[in-house]
Amino acid sequence: MKTEIRYIELKTGYHDDGPAWIGKVKLSKSGNTVYFNNKAFRKGSGASGNYYDIETHEEYWISGVKKDGGDRHWAGGGRIILAKDIADDYLAVTGQQTADKRRFIVEDIPESYPIDRINELENRTV
């Protein structure tokens, strides 16, 4: 499976200020499923998100990181949790020297990809 750095924001129950993360994700072979932080997201077109959580059906916005660092929607707010293990890579992409503490919280995000659990869930017979 391919890994990439992505921006992930919860949209369900929020406008443009939901909890948000920048971290390492795993992508399925087709790229239609994204695994991150013990969750699995499937590509879809919801009211405000472009992916949904396979287990909870909550909508999320998932995208590649922006070179200008403007990952959050212009109307949004709130700090983004930046995974400590990819912080240097993210800063290199955006050309920043340090993570602005007004915009980011740098912390550990466990690499937990529920591939087996989701495969089991999706392959159950009814």
Image (tube, rainbow, N blue to C red):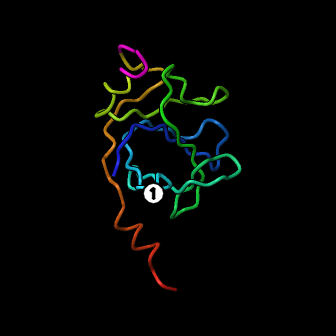
Instruction: Tell me, yes or no, whether the highlighted magenta stretch contains residue 86.
Output: no
- Relative to residue 21, is residue 55 depicted above or below? below
Q: Quadrant of residue 116?
A: bottom left
- In the picture as drawn, the residue positioned furthest to the right comes out as 47
The secondary element bearing badge 1 is classed as strand
Instruction: Tell me, yes or no, whether the highlighted magenta stretch contains residue 95.
Output: yes
- In the picture as drawn, the residue positioned furthest to the bottom comes out as 126
Q: Quadrant of residue 25?
A: top left
The boundaries of the magenta stretch are 92-97
Q: For this view, does 16 lie left or right of residue 41?
A: right
Query: Which amino acid, mark 1?
Result: Ala
Q: Residue at x 35, y 13 (%)?
A: 97
- In the picture as drawn, the residue positioned furthest to the left comes out as 85
Residue 32 place in picture, x, y as percent:
50, 54
Residue 87 place in picture, x, y as percent:
33, 28
- Relative to residue 34, is residue 9 depicted above or below? above
Q: 61 and 102: which one is in front?
A: 61
Q: 34 and 117: which one is in front?
A: 34
Q: Residue at x 53, y 43 (%)?
A: 62
Q: For this view, does 92 lie left or right of residue 103?
A: left
Residue 82 place in picture, x, y as percent:
39, 32
Residue located beneath label 1 in the image: 40
- In the picture as drawn, the residue positioned furthest to the front comes out as 30
Instruction: Categorize mark 1 by other alpha carbons within 10 Å: few (<14), some (14-19), many (20+).
Output: many
Q: Residue at x 65, y 49 (%)?
A: 13
Q: Residue at x 41, y 50 (%)?
A: 27
Residue 23 place in picture, x, y as percent:
39, 38
